[in-house]
Image: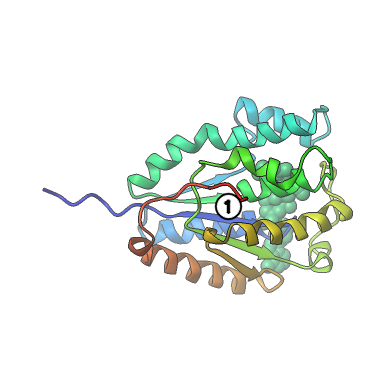
């Protein structure tokens, strides 16, 4: 009997605006692919699905929605691919994810709606696949500003981004099992890319020790 293939890794890249998440994910995707590994690249929000189109309209300020309703749509946008993501991982494909549940919880909680706490925001994420590694691309507001001013989308303002920065630290503290690694993203693209690649290859090499893919738990325990 043939041994089952080693499972793929679930790698999440998080960070503030313009930290370089998408460019680093793309570069990592190409490197892993060139080295002959099975790899996929997902990004959230995935604006191509029916749910994603509603999110896109909201982010572009073309529609208004209750804070809870839009929050649950962002989460549903992850749940709608959760099953196929798990199948890919089981088949041996490494999946790189550009923003995930951590962004989901902190951007909504940063709105300071008294009826939408960080704990409430985390609840719909419980049960989703937990990353084997989450790389947090950390960048100062000054360095981010040098990469271009805020755009026209909702959430692109300094006050909200500063609350988001603090909330990322809070959620990482509460989700310590998430294997979070902070990377200084204020350096040159190549320096950051090298650290990203080394961290990911380390994670893939240690997958046997991690065991099966885990799922997100409640943050109150
Ligand atoms: N959101 C939410 O509320 N709930 C959720 O559940 C999820 C998301 C998943 C849209 O996300 C919004 O959705 C976001 C959070 C919220 N709101 N905000 N703010 P998005 O992912 O679609 O958009 P984004 O992540 O904000 O876009 P971003 O600005 O694309 O950031 P990035 O991907 O980190 O940056 P980048 O595109 O790779 O790079 C930005 C620029 O910097 C570009 O010109 C690069 O060439 C340059 N760059 C990159 N790296 C470097 C280095 N090292 N040096 C110099 N220049 C660099
Ligand atoms: Mg991006």
Which residue is situated farthest in the front direction here?
A: 221
Q: Residue 173 location, x and y as percent?
A: 64, 62
* Between 180 and 46, the one nearer to me in the picture: 180
The colour scheme applied to this rendered structure is rainbow
**Label total for image:** 1
Label 1 sits on a secondary structure element that is loop
Q: Say whether residue 197 is left or right of residue 148.
A: left
* Between 31 and 58, the one nearer to me in the picture: 58
Q: Residue 103 location, x and y as percent?
A: 67, 49
Q: Say whether residue 67 is left or right of residue 221.
A: right
Residue at x 80%, y 48% (from the top left corner): 110
Residue at x 59%, y 41% (from the top left corner): 125
Residue at x 58%, y 47% (from the top left corner): 218
In the displayed structure, would residue 63 be above or below residue 28? above
Q: Residue 8 location, x and y as percent?
A: 38, 53
Cβ of mark 1 under 8 A from ligand 1: no
Which residue is situated farthest in the left direction here?
A: 1
In the displayed structure, would residue 84 be above or below residue 147? above
Pointer 1 residue: 221
Are there few (<14), some (14-19), or many (20+) residues within 10 Å of tag 1?
few
Write down the quadrant of residue 50 in the picture. top right
Q: Say whether residue 204 is left or right of residue 56.
A: left
């Amino acid at each position: 009997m043939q041994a089952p293939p080693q499972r793929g890794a679930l790698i999440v890249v998080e960070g503030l605006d313009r930290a370089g998440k998408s460019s680093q994910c793309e570069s990592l995707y190409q490197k892993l692919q060139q080295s002959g590994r099975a790899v996929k690249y997902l990004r959230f929000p995935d604006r191509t699905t029916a749910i994603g189109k509603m999110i896109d309209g909201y982010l572009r300020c073309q529609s208004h929605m209750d804070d809870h309703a839009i929050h649950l749509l962002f989460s549903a946008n992850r749940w709608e691919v959760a099953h196929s993501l798990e199948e890919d991982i089981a088949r041996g494909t490494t999946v790189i994810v550009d923003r995930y549940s951590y962004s989901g919880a902190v951007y909504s909680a940063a709105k300071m709606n008294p009826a939408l706490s960080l704990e409430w925001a985390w609840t719909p994420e419980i049960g989703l696949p937990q990353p084997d590694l989450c790389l947090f691309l950390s960048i100062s507001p000054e360095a981010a500003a040098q990469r271009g001013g805020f755009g026209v989308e909702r959430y692109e303002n300094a006050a909200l981004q500063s609350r988001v920065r603090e909330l990322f630290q809070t959620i990482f503290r509460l989700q310590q099992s998430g294997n979070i690694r902070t990377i200084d993203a204020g350096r040159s693209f190549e320096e950051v890319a090298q650290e990203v690649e080394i961290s990911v290859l380390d994670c893939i090499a240690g997958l046997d020790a991690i065991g099966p893919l885990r799922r997100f738990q409640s943050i109150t325990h």
